[in-house]
Image: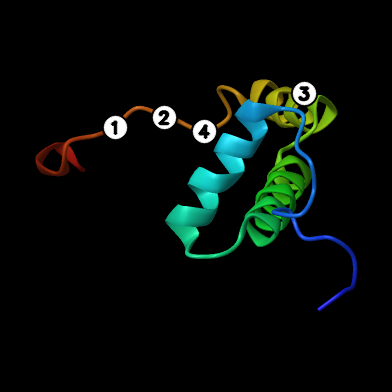
Amino acid sequence: MQGGPTMEERTTRDERLDDLAQTLADMLGVDKTEAMRLALQNEIERLRSTPTIDDQIATLRETVKNYGRKSTRMVHPSKKR
């Protein structure tokens, strides 16, 4: 464990932040410092895993480029030849 003040020892100027940290800590069964650490780690991971706008555009371009090349029409099994 690292030195320094814990979340409980710090003065939190933002009451809403303190309330959110306490709520998450209670839900996870950890202290507020660990709750904040986990929340920040999860948010960073979420943002890193979200495709960028460039990735989304590339995917759409590929979809449009291939549009119509394959039949997307469903054929009922009894109608197969």
Q: Distance between the residues labelled 1 and 3?
A: 27 Å
- What is the x, y in percent for residue 4? 89, 65
Please indicate whether residue 81 sits to the left or right of residue 33 in the image: left
Q: Do the residues labelled 2 and 1 touch (CB within 8 Å)?
A: yes
Expressed as whole percent of the image width and height from the top left, the position of residue 42 reads: 67, 51
User: Label 4 neighbourhood size at 10 Å, few (<14), some (14-19), many (20+)?
Assistant: few
> For the point 75% across and 37% down, which residue is it?
12
Could you say whether the residue bearing mark 4 is in a helix, strand or loop?
Answer: loop
Q: Residue 70 carries which label?
A: 4
Give, as a three-letter code, the residue at label 3: Ile
Q: What residue type is labelled 4?
A: Lys
- Number of marks in the rendered image: 4
Along the line of sight, the residue nearer the viewer: 50 or 45: 45
- Give me the C-alpha separation between circle 3 and circle 2: 22 Å
The Cα atoms of the two marked residues, 2 and 1, are separated by 6 Å
Q: Is mark 3 on a helix, strand or loop?
A: helix
The label nearer to you, 3 versus 4, is 3
Q: Which of marks 1 and 3 is in front?
A: 3
Q: Which amino acid is tagged 2?
A: Thr
- Residue hosting label 2: 72
Asked if marks 2 and 4 touch (Cβ < 8 Å), the reply is yes
Labels 3 & 2 near each other (Cβ < 8 A): no
Q: Is residue 35 left or right of residue 26?
A: right
Task: Check disc 1 and report the residue beneath it.
Answer: 74
